[in-house]
Image (cartoon, rainbow, N blue to C red):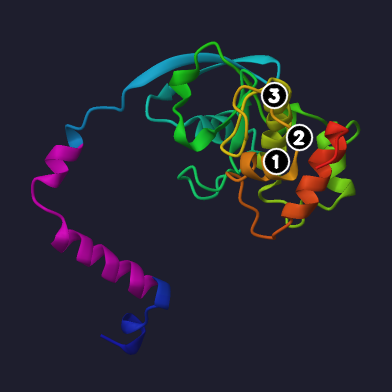
Amino acid sequence: MDDSDLKFTRREFLVTGASSAAVIAWPPSASAQQSGAKPPPMSKVSFEVNGKPQQLELDTRTTLLDALREHLHFTGSKKGCDQGQCGACTVIINGRRKVSCLTLAVMHEGDKIKTIEGLGTPDKLHPMQAAFVKHDGYQCGYCTPGQICSAVAVLDEIKSGIPSHVTADLMAKPQFTAAELRERMSGNICRCGAYSNIVDAITEVSGGKA
């Protein structure tokens, strides 16, 4: 054996070591269990996304977010925390906002879903998108799709008289105030801290004063 037989690249060494460790650690019954594993449960689901009908056959465990991003390629909705806390994946379903990472796609048979791609185009921005640009409410932009979808839905909530935790009189129509906006948008986190700019953008679109 000469020295050339003992030469390994770092990558080859790591791959060889990992493979050996896997063989040692893999339980004897694992291969049998794996070969007999049942395929994941699948189901067909039909819904409308941005005005167009869509039909998918999905693992029943697929979240709406993954269905939109991975299967339909609407990548505007972002996967942030994947725990429903950051709001980056917010979409509008039947006129109400929802974090799409916490709901299964098969639960939305027949629903009308709107993502950021369905609100406007680069040539014809939705008024809320234009206001975010004007007031620099996006900064890094990662949370912006969810922020804008929430903002559009928030204005509809206030106009429809839906109260929030800070609404003083639950029997009266909610007033358009900064406190109402901040409470209703609190589920959408902006790491850049553009909150005041976001309030300004929503206020402009509403035509009110906050």
Within the image, what quadrant is residue 1 found in?
bottom left
Q: Is 190 situated left or right of 196 in this image?
A: left
Q: Verify CB contact (< 8 Å) between mark 3 and mark 1.
A: no
Q: Position of residue 18 (x, y in %)?
A: 28, 66
Q: Is residue 21 one of those drawn in magenta?
A: yes
- The residue at the point 71 percent across, 16 percent down is 51
Indicate which disc, 2 or 1, sits on the residue closer to the N terminus: 2
Measured in 3D between alpha carbons, the distance from the residue under mark 3 to the one under mark 1, in whole angstroms, is: 14 Å
Instruction: Identify the amino acid type marked 2.
Output: Phe
Secondary structure, mark 2, is loop
Q: Residues within 10 Å of mark 3 (few under 14, many from 20)?
A: some
What residue would you read off at disc 3?
173
Q: Is residue 12 left or right of residue 173?
A: left
The residue indicated by pointer 2 is 176
Amino acid type of the residue tagged 1 in the rendering: Leu
Above or below: residue 107 compared with residue 121: above
User: Quick one: SS at disc 1?
Assistant: helix
Magenta stretch secondary structure, dominant: helix
- Residue hosting label 1: 181
Magenta residue span:
12-34
| Residue drawn at (70%, 27%) of the image | 158
- Label 2 close to label 1 by CB (< 8 Å): yes
C-alpha distance separating marks 3 and 2: 9 Å
